[in-house]
Image (spheres, rainbow, N blue to C red):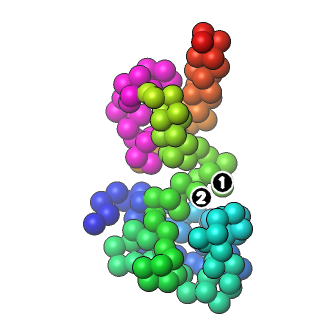
Amino acid sequence: MIHDRHHTIIALTVRPPCALTLTFADGVTMPLDLAPFANLYPALAALKDPALFATARVDGLGGYVIWIDDDLEMAADNLRNMAVEQSGGIGNERLSNWMHKHGLTQERAADAVGVSRRMLNYYLSGAKAIPKTVWLACLGWEVLEELHA
């Protein structure tokens, strides 16, 4: 069961040919154009079919958008991350990938960007938007690490 309101879809609008408007339980509504992803990933190529795309629906718990049962579905957390990135924000997966790339624990990552571990966890879970200043701190930390290597 999905417990995170920010990762629970409560409403969906299909916008042909290949876009959605998603409303999450925390009150945030975001547009998402899936055409770039359908063109990039073979597993999503079927979404380019307007008739299939129009069948998009939210599962009973709000955790997925489904087109073909057990074959073509996308999780709410991934959709929200994609929508945040597409709108110019910093998605939580980008921060998680940065930590993984550098082998950082949550404690070291929080220290590196100047936030508390608790705030870092809010960012990593997607519960709070990642400020651009935090992402810039990540990039600055990377440059400093390269200079010291």
- Hey, which residue is sitting farthest top in the picture? 148
The residue under label 2 is 83
The residue under label 1 is 87
Q: Is residue 110 left or right of residue 33?
A: left
- The residue depicted at 64 percent of the width and 69 percent of the height is 42
Judging depth in this view, the residue of 132 and 41 nearest the camera is 41
Tell me the quadrant of the picture where the N terminus can be found: bottom left
Against 28, residue 119 (above or below) is above
On whether residue 101 falls in the magenta region, the answer is: no
Question: Three-letter amino acid code at disc 1?
Answer: Ser
- The residue depicted at 53 percent of the width and 54 percent of the height is 81
Q: Position of residue 129 (x, y in %)?
A: 51, 44
Tell me the quadrant of the picture where the C terminus can be found: top right
- The residue depicted at 49 percent of the width and 69 percent of the height is 74
Q: Are marks 1 and 2 in contact (CB under 8 Å)?
A: yes
- Residue bounds of the magenta highlight: 105-126
Res. 36 in view:
yes
Against 14, residue 125 (above or below) is above
Crowding around mark 1 (Cα neighbors within 10 Å: few <14, some 14 to 19, many 20+) is: few
Q: Position of residue 41 (x, y in %)?
A: 64, 65
On whether residue 115 falls in the magenta region, the answer is: yes
Crowding around mark 2 (Cα neighbors within 10 Å: few <14, some 14 to 19, many 20+) is: many
Question: Three-letter amino acid code at disc 2?
Answer: Ala
Q: Is residue 88 left or right of residue 135?
A: right
Q: Is residue 145 left or right of residue 60?
A: right
- Hey, which residue is sitting farthest bottom in the picture? 51
Total numbered badges shown on the rendered structure: 2
Q: Is residue 133 left or right of residue 104?
A: right
Judging depth in this view, the residue of 125 and 144 nearest the camera is 144
Secondary element at image label 1:
loop
Report the magenta stretch's main SS: helix
